[in-house]
Amino acid sequence: MNLTGFNKYSKKDSVSGVEKFAFGCGEISTNIVFTISTTLLVMFYTDVVQVSAAVVGSIIAISQVFNGISDISAGFIIDRTRSKYGRARVWLLRMSIPYAIAAVLMMMVPPISGMAQTIYIFVTYNLMLTVVYTLFQLPFATTMTYMTRSQDERAKINIIRMAMSPIGNILVTLLFTRILDVMPNGGMDSQRNWVILTAIYGFFAALMMLFCFAMVRERVEVKDAAHGEKVPLKTAIGALLKNKYFIMLFIFFVSFAMYQTFSGTMATYYCKWIVGDTRIIGNVNTACYGITIVATLLLGKVMNLTTKRNWCIVGAMFIIAGSLVLLVNPTSVAVVTIGGLLRGLGMTPILGMIFTMIADAIEYGQWKTGIRTAGAIQSATTAGQKFGQGIGSVLIGFIMSANEYSGSLVTQTPHALNTISNLFIFGVAFLGVVMIAVLLFYKLDNEYPTIMAELLEREAQIDLENKTETQVKIDSTLEPEV
């Protein structure tokens, strides 16, 4: 059976336009707090709450260890979940309200002694990102693998999802700081204003995910060697480690998350201290993420011109170009905006392809091991994303602290300013090079048709065996007693 046959086989798993749109709304929801956490939270801690950059970096780095572990644990929880709403989708309902509450608690840092304040930040940061966000975002991402097995439908779902994805980022980066600036009693420097605005954003995000939950459906019926039973943890981990493409995507996610953290966090510092205008933070991020809306829709028209891997390599090249172009005029608003546009164009094919690459790795894992571990693979790649975020945050914190940066200063030293510039330009470019290096070993795009043909034949055999066993049981009950 070739790939065309596979797509024909999956016609019954077609997904409506309304359902695809609702899934895109879920993507907006997950991006709202993620963007606040990766783009604005470090500055909130250092410049509003007046916590040192080194302490913030340490908290985030240590937290990412727990965060990564929680991701993997959540993946196994999803694979073992059985409910009337499915395996993954039910968690969208369970975690929407806690998502909004935890986001607010993260901003309510009390004015207490240093160690107590550090503990509060550590606890609330982990409550949000290690516990609540993990059981909010990961099931959402995994839900797509259960909505359909059709490659065409998955591609369409992901294109719409990624076209809507920047909206969450734009709602934060373009509007959040602008709204803070015009709020009374301190504007952007007021912690109270941060709490109020985060509560509004969190409530809106919860509503978006509840809409997603109400509209999407799980259609994929799992047919693997486990026969629908809960897979033992040891077996699931073994299957995970035998999946070489999962390992590659994990490393790629670490690199890509470090890029997002460096680009997002350092853009805030760069605009404030190098360009000298915090108001253009929204312009830069809107250029970066806004262009992806149009570019992602266009990508859907040309995605078949080359493989998913090659598109991601092209994207990394644009990210490198968007960084190095700043060398032309580092303080020019126009040049910084052009750099954001190039980075946005680079992110487009990566975000447009990477989640379907994960779905492909799930199919490869089932073909390789006989066990379908969708939640575990999704969680491990997400763990890589959070590990990358943590590594990026701690590097930023320690490098800036070691190079004389202090959020309490009215002006920064030349050494600190040079560090901000180098991290935003050369740090981001280097991570683009790392992404390309990882992708050079990825060959699944060419192997996929053969793998799917064999996998479908196995599933057909499992169906036949199950029917035979059922018929034998029925026949045995009908045999007359002697």
Image: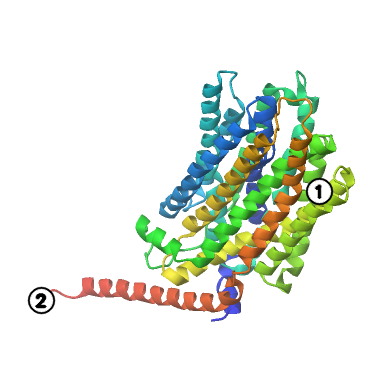
Instruction: Using residue 438 as the reference point, say whether residue 314 is left or right of it.
Output: right
Q: Residue furthest bottom?
A: 1
Secondary structure of residue under mark 2 = loop
- Rendered image coloring scheme: rainbow
Give the answer, above or below, for where 366 lies relative to 344: below
The residue under the point 51% across, 69% down is 364
Where residue 125 sits, quadrant-wise, is: top right
* Closest to the observer, 43 or 415: 415
Q: Amino acid at mark 1?
A: Ala
Q: In this rendering, does residue 202 appear at all?
A: yes
Q: Is residue 416 left or right of residue 64?
A: right
Q: Are marks 2 and 1 in contact (CB under 8 Å)?
A: no
Q: Please state the horizontal and vertical placement of residue 291, each as a whole percent of the image.
A: 80, 53
Question: What label sits on residue 173 in the rendered view?
Answer: none
Neighbour tally class for label 1: few under 14, some 14-19, many 20 plus, Cα within 10 Å: many
At label 2, counting other C-alpha atoms closer than 10 Å, the crowd grade (few under 14, some 14-19, many 20 or more) is few
Horizontal and vertical percent position of residue 213? 57, 47
Query: Could you say where residue 216 lies in the image, as x and y percent from the top left?
Result: 58, 53
**Residue at (57, 38) in percent of width and height:** 60
> Where's the C terminus, which quadrant?
bottom left
Q: Mark 2 vs mark 1: which is more N-terminal? A: 1
Give the image location of residue 79, x and y in percent: 44, 55
Circle 1: element type: helix
Q: Amino acid at mark 2?
A: Val
Instruction: Identify the mark at residue 287; answer none if there is no mark.
Output: 1
Question: How many dots with numbers?
Answer: 2
In screen coordinates, is 356 left or right of 451? right
Closer to the observer: label 2 or label 1?
Answer: 1
Q: Residue at x 67, y 29 (%)?
A: 46
Q: Give the alpha-carbon distance from disc 2 to disc 1, as whole Å.
A: 82 Å
Which residue is more in the foreground, 396 or 315?
396
Which residue is disc 2 drawn over? 482
